[in-house]
Amino acid sequence: MICVLLVAGHGTLLESEIKNEATGLYSHLVGIPKALLPGIGGKKILDFWWEVVNMRQLFNEVYLVTNADKYKYYERWATASDFPVENIINDGSTTSRTQLGAVADLELVVRSKRFNDDVMVVAGDMLCEDLNFDIAEVLKFFKFKKGELAIYYEMEEGERTESRGIVEVCPSTHSSGYLRLFSFRITKFYEKPSADVTESRLASVVFYCFQSKTLLTLGEYLKHYPLVEDRGLGKYMEWLINKARITVFGMKLPTGFQLIGQVDLSEYKKWLARYSSKQHGSAAKSITCRSYARVGIMGNPSDGFYGKTIAMTISNFWADVTICESKKVVLIPHPLNDPTEFGSLQDLHGISRKEGYLGGLRLLQATCKKFYQFCSEQGIALAKRNFTLKYDTNIPRQVGLAGSSAIVSATLKCLMKFYDLIDDDLPKPIRANFILNVETEELVITAGLQDRVVQVYEGLVYMDFSKELMEKQGYGKNRTQQPGAFADWWWQGHAAARHPLQGAGQGAGEEASGQVGRFR
């Protein structure tokens, strides 16, 4: 694999504002290219990207493409940063009017170096909120999918879609145990669209992986689009996906990107301050998540027969899981549920006979293992952050209150928050199946669907696990209910029926609920 860092743009706006800034606070940055401006913690922006890709076991070579105007700056940076100076490529442009464009710069590298490798190309002058992600996961996903790959992220409120490349994605499904997984293929790419073109807020940045055979289309594209304004990589991706119909997969990074393209001094100062404050304030922060015990009301508790059920969580029994950043991944055993010390051999015998050998620690470990696997298969690149996990629970064991799945559920919540995943990354129906998969596939615990669904949705939940739904989408139809409305429905149905059980599934009850039907 070859990595190409593009830094050949002419940042005329930012350079001009730095030069004309009245206070003189930025006079020492006059003439310095954007990629070499100070980033977070005093490092230059380009330093972060060089740290990410400087891995000989992943990349045969790393090339840097700049222009004639800024070549000397990057040559000095390379000498100080142990970057091979011979891998700096000068595209010969001196002004924005003579620049080649990113597509031509990439084609210049491929043509001049005559390699036949796959290529990862990154804009080395953009600021990433969290560059501590695992680049190896990006490359592994690219090789696994055997198609082109584009990195995207969820735009924050206030970010304008007109300033980004916007993608629309379509999930293609495959199964893994009880999990129905989704690989996201990019169906449409819009380079800086107007607000009425698409509702998507998934933003693509110059962070792509291309197969060697696809690089042959660079020359074809340049022949058809000779104007420099059409030679941005966003325009090329728009052509590749929308017109050439090349399959491109999407991989989501749970982080934001800024300082993209032409930016001004106020944007640079704003985002630098924001990212710096986030970095300094996050290390000591811990996250605690809670999941509640489950009680069944109607229907088969294990629902292994495509039935319908109603169940609810109860707030006086729960499992808490706490996660905080640490140097290594550490799972802390619970002093009562995972005992390693005993008062005597007789004490060990009595506890083991009564409670068995399996506590909650295995639940934490299995959840972490499956979470990493899920994100790898889904194309979600996690930050390279380690953590310490511990749990506590007051749910009685082996009495049907779903204590095990409560620990798994709370652990999953913690991992999602710790790695900044949102509901769209792991939707509620998929989350419930994930928890079931941890128990049945990883730990061989006999379990049904209902417990996890209720603990994910919380409250009073109606669940329809009909065979048609399960075979079509891999999960049932779940709906939260208002307890008062359910009580009224139950009373009406009970009073209207001759037999108490008959009224639970038809007549007034079925009409009131709209979807409840018969229960096993």
Image (cartoon, rainbow, N blue to C red):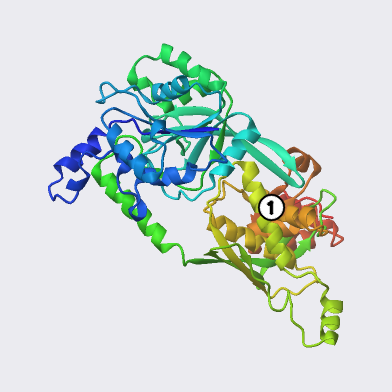
Q: In this orientation, does residue 488 appear?
A: no
**From what the image shows, is residue 105 above or below residue 487?**
above
Quarter location, residue 508: bottom right
Image coordinates for residue 135, horizontal then vertical, percent? 53, 43
Q: Residue at x 73, y 74 (%)?
A: 338
The quarter in which the C terminus is drawn is: bottom right
Q: Is residue 181 left or right of residue 103?
A: right
Q: Quadrant of residue 483?
A: bottom right
Q: Badge 1 local density, few (<14 within 10 Å), some, or many (20+)?
A: some
Image location (x, y in percent) of residue 3 = 49, 34
Residue type at numbered disc 1? Lys
Residue 414 picture location, percent across and down = 58, 61
Label 1 sits on a secondary structure element that is: helix
**Residue located at (61% from left, 48% from top):** 427
Q: Is residue 153 above or below residue 506?
A: above
Residue 486 vertical position relative to residue 83 in the rendered view, above or below? below
Depth check, front residue: 271 or 405: 271
Q: Nearer the viewer, residue 235 or 172?
A: 235
- Decide which of 58, 318 is in the foreground and name it: 58
Counting every numbered tag in the picture gives 1
Would you say 360 lies left or right of 330 here? right
Give how far across and how far down residue 328 sits, in percent: 58, 62
Residue positioned 47% across, 25% down in the render: 237
Circle 1 residue? 370
Q: Is residue 40 visible?
A: yes
